[in-house]
Image (cartoon, coloured by chain):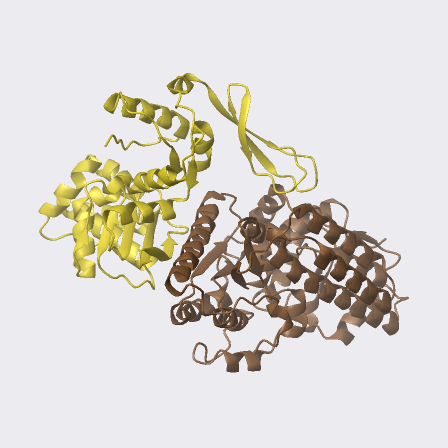
Amino acid sequence: MASAYIWTQGDPIGAVKRLLNILRRQAPDAEIGSIGTTGSARKLIGAMLHADVVKNEITAHAVGTLSRHADVRTIIEIGGQDSKIILIEDGIVKDYAMNTLCAAGTGAFLSSQAKRLEIPIEAMGDMAMQSQSPAKIAARCTVFAESDMIHKAQAGYSKMDLVAGLCRAVAANYLNNVGKGKQIVSPIVFQGGVSKNKGVLAAFQEELGEKIHVDADSHLMGALGAAILSQKKTTHRKPFDFSMLQMEYVTRAHICSGCTNNCEIVQFYRGDTLLDSWGKRCEGSVG
Amino acid sequence: MLKIGYPHLGDYHIPIRRLLQDLFPTAEIVSPPPFTQKTVELGGRHSPDFVCAPFKYNMGNYIEMLEAGANVLLQTGLGCRYGYYGEVQEQILRDLGYDFTFLCFSREKAHPQKIYETCKKLNPNLTFSIFSRAVLQAITRIYFMDQLDYFLREQIGFAKNTNCFTKTKKLFLKELTAENSMFGLYRIFHKYRARYHAIETQMPQNPLRVGIVGELYTLMEPYSNHFLEKRLAEGGIVVSRKMSASFLLFGKRDRRSLHSSRGYLQYTVGANGIDSVVGSRQYAKDGYDGLIHMKSFGCTPELNAQPALDQISRDYDIPILHLSFDTQTGEVGLETRIEAFMDMIEMKRKQQHENYNQSRRGYRLHLHKRRVH
């Protein structure tokens, strides 16, 4: 399987271009049978690539994980921006929750703290595992967590203990916020970018007292789900044209003055051709 | 000259405008400009940060109306801490340097006689008979609107041509506002009810049904919930929401509600928290496919109701989605949650059909017509 996991760096279109080039290098002879998109920019990228399926990440994650672990009951997913919990019963999603207003239990928090401590984010997990006495760090809120961490650093804790404390804070925050009131039943699968962090995994296992599975492709489950869903839905499509990666994609936004709704219309262009538009709230407005 | 302004609340601005025209025939009624991003920003900037969203939306309306020349502002207050909002809002607006008269019904505990006296001060020609007649008509209009709106919410997702419903509704509201007699209002209601029923729809035999409960402002003002009902309807779902202005006026029976929510609530939890619980339980018993619980961020009564709702969700095996709204504009998160919710109830339904061949629960509509408890 050809796969890649990269940061969008605030530019999803550029990231998709890079991603497709990487994938083409990995599998030069492969034909593209169908395309599915998921995640926050799913609509935009779906329009850009003429995707067969544009699916929300919760369904995509559930489908992806079920394809690997058919008996899964609880999916813990922590990505860069958001974290979610998906409860599954008899192979269908029974309940789910996403983090709401707070980014404390997400990868973004870990990566910003890794920068502060000047350690590569990939090394955090191994460092955390070496710690004998993790620092106690507040889990309620990133701001508190950060000031807690600075205090502990000044009190002379080693970086290892700080990192281990951070990993515990992420796990505790997740269970307090996203997992609040949810019955976490095993088998549990942990996925998303943060699942690569052994420290967080260990913290979860300790808190829940259960074994937690982490798939080798745990960071790709959403993509896998979107791919499976697109496969089911695919129609006879034109062969994918890689030359469109060279084209210029622009998004323009304006306020429609067609009626009193004053919708903010977002239009997405490839070169000069309009691909798609969003944001209209009435029947009459010009797309 | 009097220039009277009032804040927005869904489509109710139409009967409210007519009511004010009846009460103050010589005054000019300043309608609040429709909600835009600017309204919300304006309101948010001049409101305390952690106050709930209706405060901010009201503030935006007030400032825009004052800019448009209004010199009398209306606030109903009442309910939860919404009852104290009038005081704070008035002070903030005065601090901003506006000069106006502020009518706040919660100051008089909404006693009709007191409200009449306040109105009389502004319009000396007002008599009690004119006053009561105008109020009665306004309430009738609101009641009829809500009756048809309930039907519309259930059906609109399945119309062959969605425009039919919206167009008919526009005409209905126009005629309803222009009508002067009680009998006329009744006639118009019946005429349009027939028209609504005549609109062609393609509803499957057992459509997916979702019940909506929660805090009333967020429920009734579609701008503040990012047109959630429309999104659901577009996904081919029957949307049921009993909580509306006429529910607020006639439907609230706290003691009876408490009785029928036994096992979930022991005391009232403020405002409409208890109604959310009773409503949810009713939907659950009727075999609805899902519940959506909406509130503005920081709404304490609904927050109190939340554990009870979760318990209902577990007891009756009905999925529930909690949504909190503030003045944010990012819709991606909301879209993800709603899409996932729709996927979830659809998958659940499919599985049920595989298991039992047909679900054992009913598929009734028109919940609003039945006795609730």
**Chain A appears what colour?**
yellow
Please indicate whether residue A84 sits to the left or right of residue B240 in the image: left
Residue B346 appears in the figure:
yes
x then y, percent, for residue B72? 76, 56
Please indicate whether residue A181 sits to the left or right of residue A236 in the image: left
* Residue at x-position 76% and y-position 74%: B112
Q: In the picture, which quadrant includes the N terminus of chain A? A: top left
Residue A157 appears in the figure:
no
Please indicate whether residue A248 sits to the left or right of residue B34 in the image: left
In the rendered image, the residue lying farthest to the front is: B357
- Quick one: B245 or A58, which is closer to the camera? A58
Q: In the picture, which quadrant includes the C terminus of chain A? A: top right
- Eyeballing the image, is A284 above or below B358? above
x then y, percent, for residue B263? 43, 80
* Residue at x-position 49% and y-position 78%: B261
Quarter of the image holding residue A55? top left
- Eyeballing the image, is B133 above or below B160? below
x then y, percent, for residue B332? 46, 43
Q: Which chain is brown?
A: B
x then y, percent, for residue B38? 62, 42
Please indicate whether residue A166 sits to the left or right of residue A127 in the image: right
